[in-house]
Image (cartoon, helix red, strand yellow):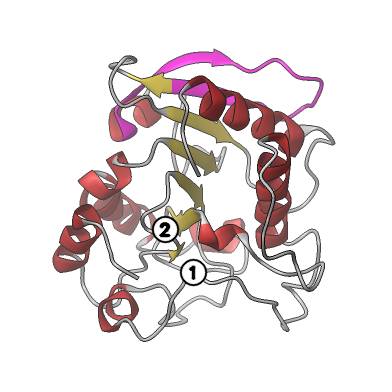
Amino acid sequence: MVYNKNFEELLKTLPDNEYVGLGNPNAKILFIGKEAGTDIGTEIFHGNTKSWKVKEFDYSKRYIPIEPHLRNLNHTWQRYQKLYDKIVSKLCIIDDNPKKDKYEITFLENIFTTEFSNMPAKTTNTAKKQIDFRTELEKRKLAFFNTNFIEQFSIIVIFANDSNYIETYSGEVSKLFKVKFDYIYDYPGRDKIWIHSGIHSGFNPKLLIHTRQLTNSISKDLLDSISEIITNFIKANSLNL
């Protein structure tokens, strides 16, 4: 894979063990979660700066997971996949390479994923109890999220409605991602969807959606509503996945 200039520049500025993400760095859509769901202190190689630099792996390739937790349709990545499937369906995109398995992960081809925190943890509660959680998070916001690479994405979806990670009401989302808050999307579910747009609406159109994380119980229509917002934006601005 050929990396774009913004991604190449980002990799030059980060330490080798910094978590960067997985998927296609040249994509137009970015998904942001809270942290990698693994044991505290785990050194994550796949998706860190060093792994992207050595180019041994192509993290935008589809694959069929064999891990039991990833073959769980309530797992975050399977819900990312379900959301992606809804987007593709609403855009009437025909996949020339149909899934070989119902658990197959294909969204990585056209979406990049990352996490707010560089510190993995099995649960949000244990993540926030780590001594350096807040200071490391603030450092990462400056060094990773406040970059041209993050700014290049036309569509950003934040899956974190815990103010310990990112605060909407005080305007942190608007400041960090250079967008403006527009409205709360009205749909039948209990989970809120905050909608933001680019400050300069006529130039490089941008959509930022902020909602809850996708683990545990989510509103019945949450994924369908998010996919509708995204596809309407793509159609209105004649974007290609």
User: Foreground: 13 or 98?
Assistant: 98
Residue that mark 1 sits on = 120
Measure the alpha-carbon separation of dots 1 and 2: 7 Å
Q: Measured along the vertical axis of the image, is residue 74 above or below residue 63? A: above
Nearer to the camera, 147 or 111 = 111
Which labelled disc corresponds to residue 96?
none
Q: Is residue 167 above or below residue 232?
A: below
Q: Do the residues labelled 1 and 2 touch (CB within 8 Å)?
A: yes
Quarter placement of the N terminus: bottom left
Residue 138, how many percent across, how many down? 29, 49
Mark 1 crowd level (few <14, some 14–19, many ≥20, 10 Å Cα): many
Region of the chain picked out in magenta, as a range: 177-196
Disc assigned to residue 117: 2
Mark 2 neighbour density, 10 Å: few (under 14) some (14–19) many (20 or more): many
Amino acid at circle 1: Pro
When the figure is inspected, residue 203 is found, relative to residue 176, above or below; the finding is above
Q: What element carries label 2?
A: loop
| Tag 1 secondary structure | loop
Residue 4 in the image, given as x and y percentages of width and height: 25, 57
Judged left or right of residue 240, residue 198 is: left
